[in-house]
Amino acid sequence: MNWGRVWIRVVAVAFVAKMLVFGGMVLDFRPNSSLEDVATAATENSNPSSPALGSGERSCNPEVMRFLRLKMARLNEKERELEKREKDLELLKKDLENKIKQLKDLERRLEGPVKKQRFEQGARLQHLAGVYSSMDPVRAAALLNKLDEDTVTKLFAIMKSKKVAKILANMSPEKAARISARLYGKNDDQ
């Protein structure tokens, strides 16, 4: 149900009825009648005391009729405008639904390669941790001193604690302290 149209019709009928009551006219009003039916009924059923337009015929005040027709034209224009906006919104909704569907499809297609890349990266890190674990702790410490702390922290998180302890003992004290804090979960910023 289009509540915008219903609201316009209710307001219009109420307005017409109000105008007719104040104009002294009595109508044969039916609930499903259109505004044009109400205006026609107003001209046909006008009160005999209201001014006549010509040769003894009873009718609605011409100014009231002009006003009602103008109001009805404005309401019809607003109704057309609302219908147009409703159609535009429906098109925008369909377009948005299509874009969401495309984004979800793209997300599903990208999900596989991203998982594959993470898996490969984890496998390489695991391999590298195995390489450093099998080295002499002094030699491994010398090489790890040259790597960035993030990579070293990731490697140490994979390696066995005893091996990490031997390598840390041979690293520069400052870097060993920062890596230990990272392993513990404390950043330099805290």
Image (tube, helix red, strand yellow):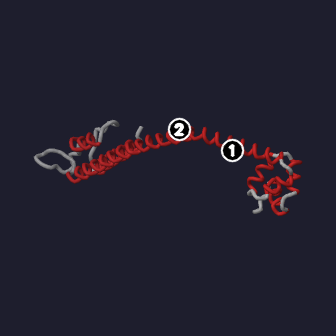
Which residue lies under the disc numbered 2? 105
Instruction: Estimate the x, y position of residue 23 in percent, counting from the top left.
Output: 27, 50
Image height of 181 relative to 5, above or below: below
Could you tell me if residue 59 is visible in this image? Answer: yes
**In the rendered image, which quarter contains the C terminus?**
bottom right
Front in this rendered view, residue 96 or 81: 96
Secondary structure type for disc 2: helix
- In this picture, residue 122 sits left or right of residue 114: right
The residue lying at 64 percent from left, 39 percent from top is 116
The residue lying at 69 percent from left, 44 percent from top is 121
Residue 158: image quadrant is top right
Front in this rendered view, residue 19 or 182: 182
- The amino acid pointed to by label 2 is Asp
Which residue lies under the disc numbered 1? 121
For disc 2, the neighbor class at 10 Å (few under 14, some 14 to 19, many from 20) is few
- In this picture, residue 129 sits left or right of residue 51: right
Secondary structure type for disc 1: helix
The residue lying at 83 percent from left, 54 percent from top is 139
Label 1 to label 2: alpha-carbon separation:
25 Å
Instruction: Estimate the x, y position of residue 36 in percent, counting from the top left.
Output: 26, 42
Could you tell me if residue 21 is visible in this image? Answer: no
Most extreme residue toward the left is: 55
For disc 1, the neighbor class at 10 Å (few under 14, some 14 to 19, many from 20) is few
Query: Looking at the image, how many numbered discs can be counted on the residues?
Result: 2
* Disc 1 to disc 2: CB gap under 8 Å: no
Instruction: Estimate the x, y position of residue 187 in percent, counting from the top left.
Output: 77, 59
Q: Which mark is drawn over residue 60?
A: none
Which label's residue is closer to the chain start, 1 or 2? 2
- In this picture, residue 107 sits left or right of residue 40: right
**In the rendered image, which quarter contains the N terminus?**
top left
- The amino acid pointed to by label 1 is Gln
Residue 170: image quadrant is bottom right
